[in-house]
Amino acid sequence: MAEKRKLFEEVQTDTRPEVQTGGIDRAKRGARGAIRIWLMVLFALVVVMIAVGGLTRLTDSGLSITEWKPLTGALPPMNEADWQAEFELYQQIPQFQLQNAWMELQDFKQIYWWEWGHRQLGRVIGLVWALGFVGFLAFRKIPTGWTGRLVWIGALGGIQGAIGWWMVSSGLEGTMLSVASYRLAVHLGLAFVILGFIAWYVLLLGRPERDLMQARRSRDAKLFSLGTGWMHFAFLQIVIGALVAGIDAGRSYTDWPTMGGGFLPPDPLMLEPAWRNFLENPGLVQFIHRMTGYLLLAFGIMVFLKSRRAANRVTAGAFLVAFIALVGQIALGIYTVISAAQLHVALTHQLLAVALFVLILRARFHAAYPVPQSVRG
């Protein structure tokens, strides 16, 4: 006969069922912190790449290397004979024959190092991405849902390398003295696309997945939509700025707020066919860049005023910082014009464009995933 248990007899504690956590907790978290640091390194390298690319363009160094050798081109000329061979290749292109025929070997070396450094940075970025991705993949440290995102960054980097050569090749034939401005705009635009994806992923990895899913319920949909529009508007202005740099349009008219004493530059449609003026006419291209800048400022003011009504103070603060950067960029753009796009001023203008783009993207992120705050805000 089975022994009866006492009413208040303690039962064994080792038979309690194990608490099952939710799907988010069971998901593969991976090395979010380490991947975030790796992406931040890639972000910094891309910013440096943009800066060196700007200097390469401003110093007219982009055509100094006339061949695309992704592997063997990593080594610069190692002796005088190698230098002479590179110089002879450069002497065969229109830029040397029509513009730089005065150059000696020592002059050529100065522009060569800028272009070589720009290409070398591209190789370093590709290597850092490949080593990081393969390492995290091999040790199974990539969080659930992140493999495709990380592959996407690498794929964009590979496409960027091909577009870089497509850009350079445009200046090696005919009567071209530099690369085609529209190809330069595509090249710079893709650099900002890559930078934007990396920045967004860094922001996502900066918070746990559970927090992101909870924050998404409080999304400020209207402000997120405005932030998206603001980001794309700024991107358009950056691409137009590349067109300006591609034909040195920033030095064509140095008066402000007028252009050549009037609202419109003289002969805005002097080229045939007419569509060429929007890409190759320095006066018209600079005019478009100016007008787009004014419109961007007006749109930024509207977004900023809307953000003042945001319930979340962190989100409102992010939009405030982005707006301050926009005002600074507009002021610096005006100074760039009146200073005839001096090297250091033009480079600072380009780097502030990077900061502005990322700050707008950050504000957009905070609208999508508001930081939790107390009831009092």
Image (cartoon, grey):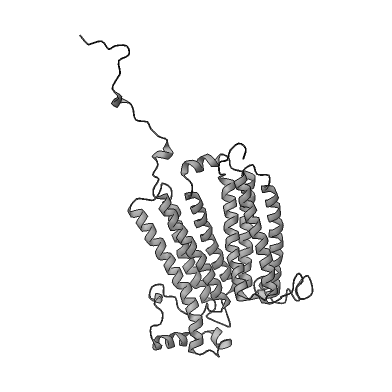
Residue at the top extreme, as displayed? 1
Above-or-below relation of 98 to 141:
below
Question: In this orientation, does residue 92 appear?
Answer: no
Q: In this view, does 227 lie to the left or right of 27?
A: right
Above-or-below relation of 150 to 3:
below
Q: In this view, does 234 lie to the left or right of 144?
A: right
- Camera-side residue: 350 or 11? 11
The N terminus appears in which quarter of the rendering?
A: top left
Q: Where is residue 106 in the image (x, y as percent from the top left)?
A: 49, 88
Q: In this view, does 3 lie to the left or right of 17?
A: left
Residue drawn at (56%, 82%), measured in percent from left and top?
Answer: 174
The C terminus appears in which quarter of the rendering?
A: top right
Q: Name which quarter of the figure residue 123 lies in.
A: bottom left
Above-or-below relation of 29 to 296:
above
Q: Position of residue 246 (x, y in %)?
A: 60, 74
Q: Is residue 368 left or right of residue 83?
A: right
